[in-house]
Image (cartoon, rainbow, N blue to C red):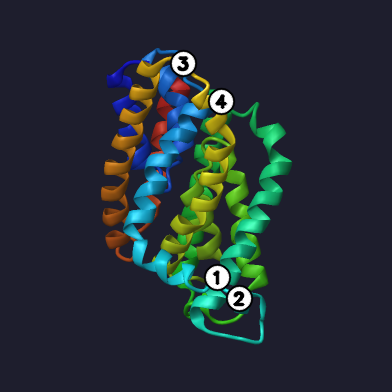
Amino acid sequence: MTFFEAIVYGIIQGLSEFLPISSSGHLALLPHVMKIQDPGVVFDLMMHLGTALAVMVYFRNDIFKYARTFTPSLANFSIGGEDRWFVRNFIFSTFISVIFIVLLIPIAKTARDPWIIIMNLSLFGGVLWFADWKNSKNTSLLDSPMMNGLQWKVAGLIGLSQAFAIFPGVSRSGITLTMALLLGLKRKEAGSYSFLLSLPIIFAGIFKEVPDILKNPDHSSLLILLTGITTSFVVGWGTIHFFMKLIGKIQLCYFTFYRWIIAGLMALSL
């Protein structure tokens, strides 16, 4: 892989990670579009490191606030507080995600076929449109449910939905946003919860692969990797800022149209 290709990967990752259009799907399709060798899942995962760092920087105040609740009192459910309830629900969502990701990994390893990605882009794009339409008709949207007691059903279903994002073309932000909207969360809250929920899973995957990356004696490859990570961080931060401004104002069907267009173009090119 060249520096130019790494920059392209970083740009695509930064743009697509936080929009409901599937970053992993785009990264998996890039080798077919650019006619280059697929760098593999590990390289794709490291591109996610850049966008994960962008989430940490953008939501740093929220992260510091929630981190302060990690005391023994967090395990005492008789003690309330909005921040404590949020963290408890967040932990439960993450726990559910981890369980189902482990169960789905063997299947996901065979899901980088372009036709499967095309199917996922199309199908889950349609579900996103339906969820957004249903949410817009809902006159009793939940007001900060994650901060008001334990929400086993809501937190569990959002965590479960995130697990399916290991299949390229599904979209991590897209599927969690879809589930949150179907469950009646307000758009902006659904967006921020979706972005924050990605952090534990991404970093767990990265820590798992770090030993293999460090064994690579090719320092030029590490520089190329760092170039891609830096690019995805910068572009990712800008995309979060843009999307959080627009999420309450625009219809998500535009992202569905984009997904269908990309799926159609890829189908014609294969």
Are the residues tagged 1 and 4 within 8 Å (C-beta)? Answer: no
Residue at point 44%, 18% (across, down): 32
Q: As drawn, which residue projects farthest toward the right?
A: 103
Residue 196 x/y as whole percent: 46, 58
Are the residues tagged 1 and 2 within 8 Å (C-beta)? Answer: yes
Mark 2 residue crowding within 10 angstroms, few (<14) / some (14–19) / many (20+): some
Q: Earlier in the sequence, mark 3 or mark 4?
A: 4
Label of residue 212 in the image:
4
Viewer-side residue, 259 vs 153: 153
Asked whether the viewer can see residue 145, the reply is no
Residue under label 1, please give it. Answer: 70
Distance between the alpha carbons at the discs numbered 3 and 4: 11 Å
Instruction: Give the amino acid at mark 3.
Output: Pro
Instruction: Give the amino acid at mark 1.
Output: Phe
Label of residue 217 in the image:
3
- In the rendered view, would you say 138 is above or below 128? below
Quarter of the image containing the N terminus?
A: top left
Distance between the alpha carbons at the discs numbered 1 and 3: 39 Å
Distance between the alpha carbons at the discs numbered 4 and 2: 36 Å
Q: Nearer the viewer, mark 3 or mark 4?
A: 3
Residue under label 2, please give it. Answer: 74
Viewer-side residue, 48 vs 126: 48
With 190 as the anchor, is 100 left or right in this view?
right
Q: Earlier in the sequence, mark 4 or mark 2?
A: 2
Residue at point 54%, 35% (across, down): 168
Q: Secondary structure at mark 2?
A: helix
